[in-house]
Amino acid sequence: MSGAVESPLIAAARAGDVVQAKRILEEDGDHRDYDALAAAFGAAVRAFRGNVAQVLLRCGADAGQCAPDELPSLREAVDSGSPALVEALLDYSIRDRYAESELLEMRDLARSWYESGVEAELRRRTGSRGALVRTRVEDDDNYTVGEFALDGMTVRDGHGAILTTLEELLGIRTSCDELMARALAQDQDHAAWGRAAIVLSHRRDQETWTAAATLRTHTDPSRRLFGAELMRLTELFADGHEEEFSVLAVDALTEWAAEETDSAVLTMVLHGLDSYQGPRAEAALLAHAGHLDAGVRRAVASGLGRSVPPRSLTDEAREALLALMADVDTDVRLAACSKAGEIMNGDPAVTNAMAALLPHPERRVRLAAVYGLALHEDERCVEEAERLGPPRPGFHDEEAGYLDVAWRFMRRRDGIGRRSESDAKCPGAGDAARFT
């Protein structure tokens, strides 16, 4: 209707305001208007806000409710260089709108952008020799891309990631060397790096494993970093610890940890041992518990202990974790506190170490301490949980999991029955009410 007031969710979608969109969705809870979600999705993609579109899809938006003429074309999305936008338009609910011939054409368009380079193609299209403005922007919750502006035209440099996505969708098996080249043309936070690493790590074959293992001895730290990430993901995505390539990855990462000198690479190597429990992996982690780099110590804290029942720690790992809970770096303390809460039950030294973090100036550390103490059924979590209150607007998903554990402990302690059906559908909803 002409002159109608735009809804807050559509306004946030059009503006690309992810935090505001999440706040509105959190407030709606179980009472979301799915027609409004679809309308907001349409507004987000028309405004080329792929990051908001992805959030809306995760919250139940049905892209299929948008007519084809209500959305930008796939060509426009590929031209934009935003992997998040392209993936939103390739959502399963509307994917069948594109014929294979169109997808192949879009694959060729993405390859043309990638091979030419964003700057060269921008200058060709605009005919401008002016100054190019470069910035780094978040494309979705996980990755960033470069954004280039020239003579009124703005394009992101995610065409390598888009190319990889379209090839996978079409069933085209791109060589390891080419996927690695796309990743290594960028840094670890870039969408092209992440997309290539995920695709390669799902290939359970000797060719991919050999390519990853070869990078281990490369003189370039960035190439070793990519190799370490491939091994980490290979182990993470394995069907079980006995799978051939999982065993190979753990063996290689364990040996690698003893020889790697670059802190960023070593951090990735140690994270590769997170989900594997065994004496060799533990020894590799413990050897770096006192490392000068905080990122390495965080990886140690995250990896120690058995994460499958029965959850436990060896004496050596327990002492290391207690020391890491008193680390000078906040993120190290946070990782150690979270791991200690999940692994051990009722150890006074551990619960006292967690309780010592309750007065910490950062809310995220206090949340982790409350979470750990609640898992240990320690009364000291109660007062701090009530002080923390409900999850903050815009941070519900991050905070509700911590607070929910404390809420459930208090319910058990007070002999109160199970949560209502509506609370069960919306994690953290009961907690917010309890802490208000």
Image (cartoon, rainbow, N blue to C red):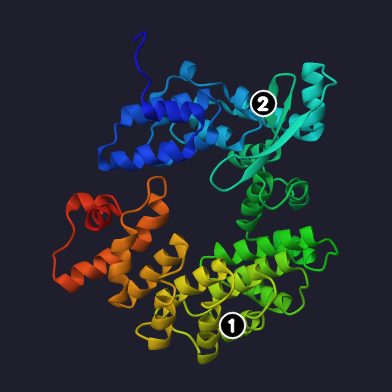
* Residue 340 drawn at (x, y percent): 45, 77
10 Å crowding of disc 2: few (<14), some (14-19), many (20+): many
Q: How many marks?
A: 2
Q: Is residue 242 visible?
A: no
Q: Quadrant of residue 386?
A: bottom left
Q: Quadrant of the N terminus?
A: top left
Q: Is residue 420 left or right of residue 298?
A: left
What residue is shown at x 56% (from left), y 64% (from top)? 236
- Residue that badge 2 annotates: 79
Instruction: Please state which of residues 378 and 83 is positioned toward the viewer in this rendering.
Output: 378
Q: Is residue 116 visible?
A: yes
What residue type is disc 2 on? Asp
* Residue 44 drawn at (x, y percent): 48, 28
Can you say whether 431 is above or below 266 in the image?
above
What residue is shown at x 43% (from left), y 77% (from top)? 356
What residue is shown at x 45% (from left), y 25% (from top)? 42
Q: Are marks 1 and 2 in contact (CB under 8 Å)?
A: no
Q: Helix, strand or loop at disc 2? A: helix
Numbered tag placed on residue 114 in the rendering: none
Can you say whether 65 is above or below 217 in the image?
above
Q: Quadrant of the C terminus?
A: bottom left
Q: Helix, strand or loop at disc 1? A: helix
Instruction: Please state which of residues 45 and 403 is positioned toward the viewer in this rendering.
Output: 403
Instruction: Please state which of residues 244 and 197 is positioned toward the viewer in this rendering.
Output: 197
Q: Quadrant of residue 99?
A: top right
Q: Earlier in the sequence, mark 1 or mark 2?
A: 2
* Residue 34 drawn at (x, y percent): 32, 32
- How much space separates mark 1 and mark 2, taking CA atoms? 47 Å
